[in-house]
Image (spheres, rainbow, N blue to C red):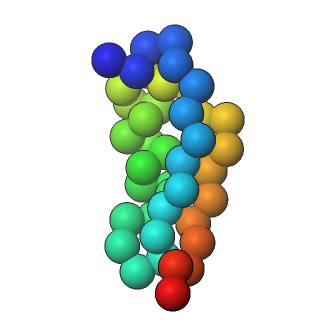
Amino acid sequence: MLSGKKVAVLGDQNGISGQAIEACVKAAGGEVVFSSTECFL
């Protein structure tokens, strides 16, 4: 589904981290161009 797509990942420090989302995107065939885990208050 994400094969050939470029993805920007924003994770949440108190939820799902950027690294976890990045792993899922890569497993689905996508290319991660930006990944970050932020704290949204």
Residue 8: x and y in percent read 58, 41
Q: Is residue 1 left or right of residue 2?
A: left
User: 19 above or below 41?
Assistant: above
The residue located at (42%, 54%) in the rendering is 20
The residue located at (38%, 30%) in the rendering is 27
The image quadrant where one finds the N terminus is: top left
Residue 3: x and y in percent read 43, 14
Residue 33: x and y in percent read 67, 35
Q: Is residue 15 left or right of residue 17?
A: left
User: 19 above or below 26?
Assistant: below
User: 31 above or below 36?
Assistant: above
The residue located at (58%, 72%) in the rendering is 38
Residue at the outermost bottom position: 41
User: 24 above or below 4?
Assistant: below
The residue located at (53%, 56%) in the rendering is 10
Residue 37: x and y in percent read 57, 66
Q: Is residue 30 left or right of residue 1?
A: right
